[in-house]
Image (cartoon, grey):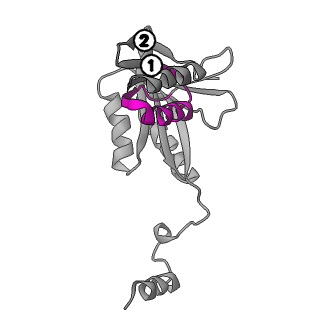
């Protein structure tokens, strides 16, 4: 029996459960979630464990204490999935005891996302001049320079950093270090 015949038979069969239903209309999207948590041992492990236990991938993860007085930390997570999957992630996060609030930055009109990267480029002559010219266009800071290399600091959206890295590749890209996505919402209130 050929693969095509097997696939045709599977398509003709009734699904055994709701989990077997295929949703061709489900679109994979990327979402940024800001998770406000109590700053206590094991919280990050519990949040990351929630993702890994369910087979969800984390594309970017940043964590820092944001309020020492109330011992609150902000975990910014970027993940991909269908709308249903991403809603399940948000609901599961809210069930964790140390999680105070989950803010969907991507679906918020007031959401701001930025990332920082350090990009090392080695080159001489024309390639060196071109790398410096492109860095000015991207408003990068040169934070280290030698006769053979530069280290650029670039801040912006993830796509801006991707574009800068792509342009540096033929000019002598050596290595890249990225912070991961940081996010806030505009307005006078916290988490507004």
Count of number-bearing discs: 2
Question: As drawn, which residue projects farthest toward the bottom?
Answer: 1
- Residue that badge 1 annotates: 152
Q: Answer yes or no: do the residues labelled 1 and 2 have beta carbons within 8 Å?
A: yes
Q: Residue at x 52, y 18 (%)?
A: 140
User: Which callout, 1 or 2, points at the residue further toward the start of the chain?
Assistant: 2
Magenta-span inclusion, residue 166: yes
SS category of the residue bearing label 1: strand
Q: Quadrant of residue 25?
A: bottom right
Magenta-span inclusion, residue 163: yes
As rendered, which of 39 and 131 lies closer to the eye?
131
How far across and down, in percent of the image, does residue 54 sit?
A: 38, 51
Q: Residue at x 49, y 77 (%)?
A: 15
How many angstroms separate mark 1 from mark 2 (CA)? 6 Å
Q: What quarter of the picture does the C terminus occupy?
A: top right
Q: Is residue 27 left or right of residue 72?
A: right
Q: Residue at x 45, y 77 (%)?
A: 16
Residue 182 can be seen in this image: yes
Start and end of the magenta stretch?
A: 152-181
| Up/down of 125 relative to 144, above or below | below
């Amino acid at each position: 029996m050929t693969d095509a015949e097997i696939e045709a038979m599977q398509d003709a069969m009734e699904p055994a459960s709701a989990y077997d239903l295929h949703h061709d209309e489900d679109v994979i999207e990327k979402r940024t979630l800001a998770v406000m948590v109590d700053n206590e041992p094991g919280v990050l492990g519990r949040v990351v464990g929630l993702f890994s236990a369910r087979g969800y991938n984390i594309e970017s993860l940043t964590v820092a204490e944001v309020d020492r007085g109330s011992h609150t930390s902000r975990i910014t997570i970027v993940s991909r999935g269908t709308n249903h999957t991403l809603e399940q992630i948000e609901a599961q996060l809210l069930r964790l005891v140390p999680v105070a609030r989950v803010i969907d930055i991507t679906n918020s009109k007031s959401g701001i996302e930025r990332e920082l990267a350090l990009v090392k480029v080695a080159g001489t002559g024309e390639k060196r001049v071109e790398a410096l010219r492109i860095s000015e266009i991207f408003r990068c800071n040169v934070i280290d320079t030698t006769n053979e290399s530069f280290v650029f600091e670039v801040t912006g959206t993830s796509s801006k950093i991707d574009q800068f890295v792509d342009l540096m590749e033929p000019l002598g890209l050596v290595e890249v270090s990225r912070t991961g996505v940081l996010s806030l919402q505009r307005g006078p209130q916290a988490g507004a």
